[in-house]
């Protein structure tokens, strides 16, 4: 199994993430859908809550996969997860899910 480094998704990751998304799905997400990762998702006059997050996996400084998820009080829900074709079956997705569990 390869060693993947998982970290918080950043806006500079988007070109690579969009490439992975387009090669992985018949109906891929676009900038609008991924944009939710970088915004506050719920606002009141006294409170701002960020509920949608993204994690990126890297192998030798190359983005190999990602997961987008939403956090609720006692659980999280995976909204989108994908791995670049050349990194499939090498443990990238397992690394992403294990990162969420930690």
Image (cartoon, rainbow, N blue to C red):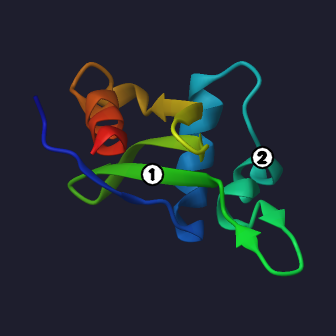
Q: Which callout, 1 or 2, points at the residue further toward the start of the chain?
A: 2
Q: Circle 2 sits on which residue?
A: 33
Q: Which mark is residue 55?
A: 1
Specify whether 18 is left or right of 10.
right
Q: Quadrant of the C terminus?
A: top left
Specify whether 25 is left or right of 75.
right
Vertical position of residue 26 compared to residue 98: above or below: above
- Give residue 46's position: percent from left, percent from top: 81, 81
Q: Residue at x 10, y 28 (%)?
A: 1
Q: Residue at x 46, y 43 (%)?
A: 66
Q: Which mark is residue 63?
A: none
- CA separation in Å, label 1 and label 2: 15 Å
SS under mark 1: strand
Instruction: Categorize mark 2 by other alpha carbons within 10 Å: few (<14), some (14-19), many (20+).
Output: few
Q: Residue at x 49, y 60 (%)?
A: 9
Q: Residue furthest bottom?
A: 46
- Where residue 38 sits, quadrant-wise, is bottom right
SS under mark 2: helix
């Amino acid at each position: 199994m390869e060693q993947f480094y998982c970290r918080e998704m950043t806006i500079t990751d988007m070109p690579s993430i969009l490439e992975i998304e387009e090669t992985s799905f018949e109906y891929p997400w676009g900038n609008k859908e991924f944009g939710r990762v970088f915004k506050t998702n719920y606002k009141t006059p006294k409170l701002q809550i960020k509920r949608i997050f993204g994690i990126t996996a890297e192998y030798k400084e190359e983005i190999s996969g990602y997961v987008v998820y939403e956090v609720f009080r006692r659980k999280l829900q995976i909204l989108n997860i994908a791995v670049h074709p050349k990194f499939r079956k090498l443990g990238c997705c397992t690394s992403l899910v294990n990162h969420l569990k930690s």
